[in-house]
Image: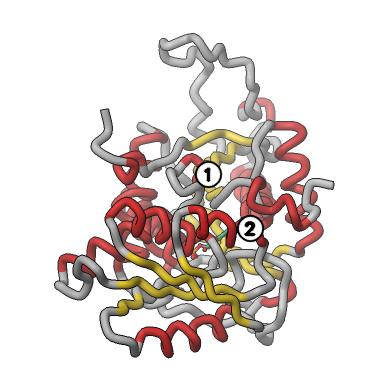
Amino acid sequence: MKRGILDTIGSPLVQVESPPGSAIAAKIESKNPGGSAKDRPALAMVEAAEAAGELDAGDRIVEPSSGNTGIGLSVVAAAKGYDVTIVMPASKSPERRRLMSAYGADIELVDGTISDAKARADELESEAGTVQLGQFENPANPEAHYRTTGAEILEQVGDRRVDALVAGIGTGGTVTGTARRLTEAFPGMDVVGVEPEANAVLSGGEPNDDEFQGMGPGFVSPNLDRERLTDVETVGIDAAEAECRRLAREEGILVGQSSGGSLVAAKRVARRLADERGIDPGRCPGPNNDVGILDDGPSDREPINEACPLIVTVFWDSGERYMSTGLFE
Ligand SMILES: Cc1ncc(COP(=O)(O)O)c(C=O)c1O
């Protein structure tokens, strides 16, 4: 028995469709209690503030968020008894606002981008008893992914080497912390960041509006350790959304745009690594979903051939959070 909902943070690693000669597996982060990867940094940032004596009973947490961090903080604040105000760009999906309200959070909408939301959160923070956790610069954010996401992946792949991590970048916490843990085990592996084609700041483009929720903040986040990236891929919204629809209809996996976009990029990396190694495609079968759900024994499927590159990616949240955007229509 778990001692509370925050004890259930963690997610499965699931093999998904991959180009011939490769294997791709995704962390299904919608399985976290608040439904996204952001439960991890939300809890870690609150615990770090508590440990530093910056957050006390009765205090109010304030945070700018495009959604998932806000929801994660709303869950953590509810479970730990804090008040919370989330400042959110009005353009983000209404499902997210309703979820935060359901957990008892106060929401403030601002016109503009996440930078405008941050400016408003800075104003609110000047009020007494209000603490901003600062997901873009708080080291507890990447540290959470180092301790949990990265460590879980290592356990989940067993003896198997991970050849590449491919992940979208918002605060950079996921890619930075996870890569730091994985590269300790697999030095020399590829670490590929993913950003929106229309807002490709890391690739040298100008900051711009884009339709992705969660990745592409339009600036280089202090929490992104660029030194860890071996490459950056850009992905367009149409390709990302088409991948979301395919994942739902062909694999039974419901995810949002940044997850679809990360898989599009992961497939490019997989193709490149398989080509470089001259892999015989027949040696790396794709996933098949004929696993009996009532079978408690270990899967008797063949382990993935060691020669096939294994690429790990992250699916941040569930497609249910995007229904109002028309993504699945
Ligand atoms: C849906 C979604 N995708 C991707 C990301 C990027 O994660 P990170 O902020 O760790 O870079 C986020 C972060 O909020 C997100 O909500």
Mark number, residue 318? none
The answer to which of 205 and 80 lies nearer the viewer is: 80
Q: Is residue 236 left or right of residue 8?
A: right
Outermost residue on the right side: it is 329
- Helix, strand or loop at label 2? It is helix
Residue that appears at 59% across and 57% down: 98
Say the numbered circle drawn on residue 30: 1
Amino acid type, callout 1:
Ser
Task: Look at 30% across and 65% down and name the residue there.
Answer: 45
Q: Dot 1: few (<14), some (14–19), or many (≥20) neighbours within 10 Å?
A: many
- Residue 115, given in percent of the width and then of the height, sits at 55, 84
Q: Amino acid at mark 2?
A: Ser
In this rendering, position of residue 322 left or right of residue 102 = right
Q: Position of residue 172 (x, y in %)?
A: 47, 68
Residue 327 as seen in the image, left or right of residue 309:
right
Q: Is mark 2 within 8 Å of ligand 1?
A: yes
Residue at 68% across / 51% down in the picture? 260
Q: Nearer the viewer, mark 1 or mark 2?
A: 1
285 displayed left or right of 72: right
Viewer can see residue 225:
no
Q: Are marks 1 and 2 in contact (CB under 8 Å)?
A: no
Q: Label for residue 258?
A: 2
Classify 10 Å Cα crowding around label 2: few (below 14), some (14-19), many (20 and above): many
Q: Secondary structure at mark 1?
A: helix
Task: Give residue 219's position: percent from left, percent from top.
Answer: 55, 82
- Image quadrant for the N terminus? top left
Residue sitting nearer the eye, 139 or 102? 102
* Residue sitting at x 50%, y 46%: 29
Q: How is the image coloured?
A: secondary structure
